[in-house]
Structures are given as structure tokens and as C-alpha cells.
Amino acid sequence: MALIRVAIVDDQTLIREGLAALLALVPDLQVVGQAADGQAAIELAAAQSPDVILMDVRMPGLNGVAATREIRRRFPATRVIVLTTFDDDEYVFQSLQAGASGYLLKNADPDYLAAAIRAAHAGDSMLDPAVTQKVIQRAVSVEGTALQLTLSEKLTPREREILHLMVKGATNAEIAASLCLSTGTVKNHVSHILDKLGARDRAQAIRHAVEWGLTYE
């Protein structure tokens, strides 16, 4: 059975020793070194070439995010799992952007931690369930913003005016009167709006406009 070589980086000695003792009970994992800060972690990666590093975030000197970025740049074969007590949004995304293969909280179940190490070694990723929700929310937010920008670019200024009045409940005749247009012109604009929003009818277009933030107050 091939052993997965693991290094532990944490500024608290009790945490490092506790993790080392815990991983020693797992047959396919071997702890090959420990470090107390980010700079020492980089030196450890160079000296021992661990397969996976368990990396704390908040440490004196070079923090875990910066160390992860440097290790992934210099030693791409070494995977990094951030293991911390913090589920702060910025730590999560900074760590993942730096190249971490996982983000777990220190209260993670030992079996889950071992599974995450194996997954990282295999090139996969595992996130703490609480962290996974944050990633999903961020992805949805980014996707929604991109959608809003894309559709906003598709709609002409006049179409946006008409869409805004549609959301406020104005009829085609009322929109025509408000914008000094003919009713036929408004109907054509409404048709184009529905087409661009992929809406089957006026009600769905209005719902999309509200959900996607395409209107203004």
C-alpha cells in the first residue's frame, strides 16, 4: 500500500501534535514533517516533498494563504488543504484562489479529514459543508451579476425604459403616452424585450426583470 506523505503546518504545537497523533492511526497516511509558520512550510515542502500539506490560515509572519500560493507555484505536485477554525468568506476564497485543494474546519470528523487528504492526493477537492454553501452562494452571485450585465447590454436604453414601466404595471397605451410613442411602436419594443429576455409573455418578462435586477427605481 502506497503511503500518502502528509505535512502539518500550524502555529500551535498542541494542534500539530494532535493532528500528527490522529493521522498516525490511519494506515495509508504518513506524517513527514511539521512547521509553525508559512515560511517554514515552504522550506518543509522543499525538503520533504510531501504529497499533501494541512495548512493553517492565521500564523505569524507568512500566513497560510500566501504560503499556499508559493508552494503551489514552486511545487505543483504538492497539494494543500487549508485546515482552520475560521470559515470567513475571504479566507475561503483567497485560499481556493491560491490553489488549495480543500478547505476544512478543525472540528472536521477524522474520517472526513482522511478522506479529504486522499481526495487531494488524487487531484480532487473536498470542502467543509459550511464552506461549500459559501462557494455556491458566491458562484450564484457572480453568475447573476454576469447575467444582469449581459442582458443589460442587449437591451437598448428605450427598451429598458419600457421594461421599467412594464414592471410598474403600465399598459402599452400608458407606456406610449408616457414616452410619446405610438402604441404600435411600444408593441414592437415589448416584443423585442420578450425575445431578448427569453420570456414567453409579458408576465414572465416582468418577473425576469425583477429577479435579474434589470430595472431601476
Image (cartoon, helix red, strand yellow):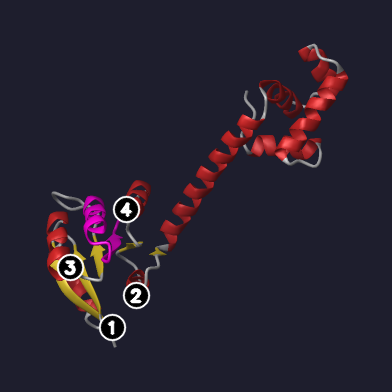
- Real-space CA distance between mark 1 and mark 3, rounded to the nearest whole angstrom: 19 Å
- Residue receiving disc 4: 95
Foreground label between 4 and 3: 4
Foreground label between 1 and 3: 1
Q: Secondary structure at mark 2?
A: helix
**Circles 4 and 3: CB atoms closer than 8 Å:** no
**Circles 1 and 2: CB atoms closer than 8 Å:** yes
Identified at 82% across, 22% down, the residue is 186
Q: Nearer the viewer, residue 217 or 197?
A: 197
Report x, y in % for residue 145.
Answer: 54, 39
Q: Give the residue type at disc 1.
A: Asp
Is residue 192 visible in the rendered image? The answer is: yes
Which region is colored magenta?
64-86
Q: Secondary structure at mark 4?
A: helix
Q: Earlier in the sequence, mark 1 or mark 3?
A: 3
Q: Nearer the viewer, residue 143 or 91?
A: 143
- Residue receiving disc 1: 28
